Amino acid sequence: MRISLPCPPHSGNSTATTLNSRLHTAMAEEKPELEFYDNNSGDVDKEFEEWKQKFEKSYESPEEEAKRKKLWLQTRVMVTEHNRKYQRGMVTYTMGVNQFADLRKSYESPEEEAKRKKLWLQTRVKVTEHNRKYQRGMFTYTMGVNQFADQAEGEYPHSCLH
């Protein structure tokens, strides 16, 4: 669940503004259940097996499973680090481990990876600037970085169609 800060006060008494403010306030009061993981616990193998069952995961070979488990473990570390930042007020949303925890994007060449990283960083700057304007009351919604952040304008619709 994504938690947004309540909308800044608006001038005027429109019903839409009042309802919008109440909705954001109610959402901000919800306490999300945070997920934290310890990859050094003895239960990691059991948890991986439970996760695979929950999301109906199976792999072609023991080597593939080992590779996916490593990615899954990395995801758990990332989620834990992010949720600790949430607890300290450094980010406004929580993360959890889902069915995509064993996946990572890979690129065909180092040049392609560099290009995608540059696009991702540009998107991150755009999102950060937008969310700062939101905090100053210039927008009524927040933005976030998602799985399409490394795509150039015009690539998203094409990638979703194929």
Image (spheres, grey):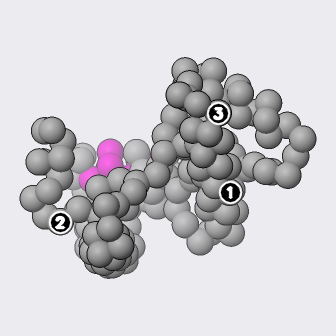
Displayed quadrant of residue 56: top right
Q: Nearer the viewer, residue 73 or 22?
A: 73
Q: Is residue 46 above or below residue 133?
A: above
> Is 83 displayed left or right of 40 in the figure?
left
Q: Residue at 87% across / 46% down in the picture? A: 41
Q: Residues within 10 Å of mark 3 (few under 14, many from 20)?
A: few
Q: Is residue 54 above or below residue 92?
A: above
- The x and y percentages for residue 5 are 46, 61
Q: Nearer the viewer, residue 7 or 31?
A: 31
Mark carried by residue 62: 3
Q: How far, Cα to Cα, is label 2 from label 3?
A: 36 Å
From the image, tell me which residue sits under label 1. 77
- Which one is earlier in the sequence, the residue at label 1 or at label 3? 3
Q: Is residue 137 above or below residue 28?
A: below
> Is 112 displayed left or right of 81 in the figure?
left
Kind of residue at badge 1: Val
Q: Residue at 68% across / 69% down in the picture? A: 88
Q: Disc count in the image?
A: 3
Mark 2: which secondary structure? loop
Which of pointers 2 and 3 indicates the residue nearer the eye? Answer: 3
- The x and y percentages for residue 43 are 85, 37
Magenta stretch mostly in which secondary structure?
A: helix
Mark 1: which secondary structure? helix
Q: Which region shows up in magenta?
A: 17-22
